Image (cartoon, grey):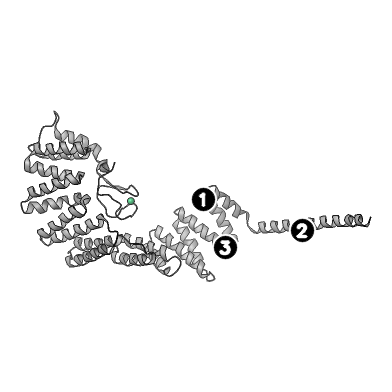
Amino acid sequence: MDFESWWLILFPLLFGLGWVAARFDFRQMLSETRALPDSYFKGLNFLLNEQPDRAIDAFIEVAKLDPETTELHFALGSLFRRRGEMERAIRVHQSLLSRSDLPVREREHALHEIAQDYLKAGMLDRAELAYKELSHTRYEESSSRALVRIYESEHDWPRAIEAVTRLGKLTGESVAQLVHYHCEMAQARLTQQPTDVLAAKDALDLARQGLDAADDSTHASHARVLMLAAAIAQGEGDGALERQHLRQVMKDAPEYVGLVADELQVNFAATDESSALLRLLLTQYEQYPSLDLFDVVFGLINSQEGGEAAWAFAEQALTQNPSLLGFEHALRVSAKTETSVSLAPIDTALLQKLISRHTQRLERYGCRVCGFQAKAFYWQCPGCHGWETYPPRRLEELQ
Ligand SMILES: [Zn+2]
């Protein structure tokens, strides 16, 4: 009997305790939830529904209510940046940086954010300063990469060389663009007025050293160094040395021979050896057929042996490597020559015009990485800023 009466007291007591505990937890949860303003959840909701504009408005509301929330400021700042509202992004990050109580870690984070804002806004000087301040922080690597990009876009090659060397040491990666930076410097010395051949030679020597040091040097960088050496020799009137370099391009980087075709022709013509060049290029074409080489060979045969021989070559070459561009170029050369060969009942000039309307698109070079197309050949893609992303082939040849 006693046992049962104990239970009668214990049951309601336990029940009551449970109820109190549950009510307490629930209340605490409610109060915590109330501490976060409604706007916060609204903002989150908009963000999840991919409505960044409305999310920003909601978060601004929260930030006003609680200016101490640094994470929210970072979120807002990167939202603004992603939407291209650079002024607002910069203002948010500036307000963070102006706080004297901001811990070092957060400060570096804010500096890294504002550096990205400046870079995206095209304020390169400020971006450079901010990124420089971040050396020896956890953002060192990404800052070094950004600095390399900044100096590249400013064509500040000495600084780019410095920065990329530092990046190479930091990451242990080989930096392929180093050779190109020295080449860019050499090129700049050659094109400036007045030209500074000595400085160009020094820069080229450094490019060669970079080439020797790199264990994965490419045909492209070999070709470029040789082409610059040829240009320097040509500028100094040393035709023999120029020819030596140009022939080295044919040997070391045969796919780049199209880029030196004009120089080869001028060089051999100067010593009245165009027929020797023709023989050389015919052999090269057999091994490495390319459109640019076809053009040169066709033109040389046309001028040396006449239209009929040129077209005989074209017929054979175009059968093996069909090219609408090649055909059109051959027609163009024929139309210009007085002794043009009648191919068909229609005029070659007219035929060439008809085809060229369709071949213009095919004649461009295209970036392997981003697809950026251009009439000129680039060592660095203007679209994605990648180095050596342009194959030395026209679009038609790549299809
Ligand atoms: Zn590209």
Closer to the camera in the image, 332 or 322: 322
Q: What x and y, as percent, mark residue 285?
A: 17, 45
Q: Give the side of residue 164 with respect to residue 16, left or right.
A: left
Tell me the amino acid under the disc marked 1. Answer: Asp
Looking at the image, tell me whether mark 2 or mark 3 is earlier in sequence order.
Answer: 2
Give me the disc on residue 53: 1
Tag 3 residue: 69
> Does 238 appear above or below 348?
below
> Disc 1 or 3, which lies upstream in sequence?
1
Residue under label 2, please give it: 21
Task: Single out the mark in the foreground, 1 or 2.
Answer: 2
Distance between mark 2 and mark 3 Cα atoms: 32 Å
Q: CA distance from mark 1 to mark 3?
A: 20 Å
Which one is closest to the eye, mark 2 or mark 3?
2
Nearest the viewer among 306 and 346 is: 306
Q: Residue at x 17, y 33 (%)?
A: 350
